[in-house]
Amino acid sequence: MIQPIYLDYNGTTPHDPEVIAAMRPFLEVEFGNPSSSHWYGIKPRQAVEAARRQVAGLLGCRPAELFFTSGGTESNNHAIKGLARALKHKGRHIVTSAFEHPAVLEVCRYLAGEGFETTYVPVDGQGMLDPLAIASAVRSDTILITIMHANNEVGTVQPIAAIAAMARARGIVMHTDAAQSLGKIPADVRDLGVDMLSVAGHKLYAPKGIGALYVRQGVQIEKFCHGAGQEKGARAGTENVLEIVGLGKACEIAARDLAANMTHMQAMRDRLHQGIAGRLPEVRLNGHPDLRLPNTLSLAFRGMEANRLLEEIGLEVAASAGAACHADSVTLSHVLEAMQVPMEWAKGTLRFSTGRLTSSADIDRAIEVVVGAVQRL
């Protein structure tokens, strides 16, 4: 059976062959514990620190400002909970958007049980936040602003640098979830001006189950878990050496090939968009037309049902839905709801996301499949 064309790179990415090659010795030979003082611990320990330098190289930070996590969700949890609990004596107010990933929204909701209050700032119809609206939501007891760098569903890239500058001027810590942006657009913490940034390896051609959190020197957050003091005490537990090595290599590749990858992914995205919109009369783009990830295409097909479309194309094209239609109801993603996309469009939304391996032939075939499915339905 021929595999479907993969256009869901925002969901996860395949392992880069260079990443696999870098990991292989730590799967087959170098099994030692990095905390061991004997010979078997030397290479694993060196590999962890080399990977830390590679991740730091992509982010433009000091290696000492990074520690490894199990992924983007843990990084977000640690950043938000850790900062909130460390600064609760100063205030208990958090500002975020209605547009965030559940790994941020659910953490903020959880913290309500500990006496914290969160303000959810709305986005406009293109998924863009106004820095002035963020500033207006700030209170005297605000301790944290957390806004994603780029949205996972529609790709809109937020004005993080402007928001971070406002936060710093007011003495408020700024966190950004950069799970979707790394390797697709520049994400240098010096340019963004953020105090904390979350990384997810599996969006970056590294394995699932590995991530990182950048915490600017001087920012204090509570420990994520307690134990023997690995990762400078920030996250106890024997290091996941195999996948840390993979993340490090993936970040090295992302930094090295960023410009070429951006150009390629955008060319494939635009080819898909033009091919579909040129043959179907009622297609709408969700998200900002220009300020979005170069690989992300959220299209709404008027009057269609997203899950029915996915069923129709599923054997030939892998994509994701923005809505789930049931017998008596339609469940929209919170992202489309936040953008107030009209129901007649929102319920027929599909997200296509291109990647390094996407070819022109893949795109041309996907156009035929999607257009044919819409016409049949």
Image (cartoon, helix red, strand yellow):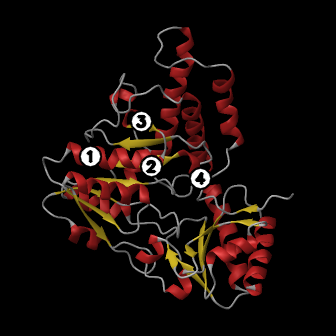
Q: Nearer the viewer, residue 260 or 171?
A: 171
Q: Quote the CA–CA distance across marks 1 and 2.
A: 15 Å
Q: Quote the CA–CA distance across marks 4 and 2.
A: 24 Å
Residue type, numbered disc 3: Phe
Mark before the other along the chain sequence, 3 or 1: 3
Residue depicted at 49% across the width and 44% down the height: 71
Which of the labelled discs sits on residue 83, or is there none?
1
Q: Nearer the viewer, residue 344 or 216?
A: 344
Which of the labelled discs sits on residue 67, or is there none?
3
Q: Residues within 10 Å of mark 3 (few under 14, many from 20)?
A: many
Q: Residues within 10 Å of mark 2 (few under 14, many from 20)?
A: many
Mark before the other along the chain sequence, 4 or 3: 3
Q: Secondary structure at mark 1?
A: helix
Q: Are marks 2 and 3 in contact (CB under 8 Å)?
A: no
Identify the image quadrant of the C terminus: bottom right
Q: Quadrant of residue 142?
A: bottom left
Which of the labelled discs sits on residue 73, or is there none?
2
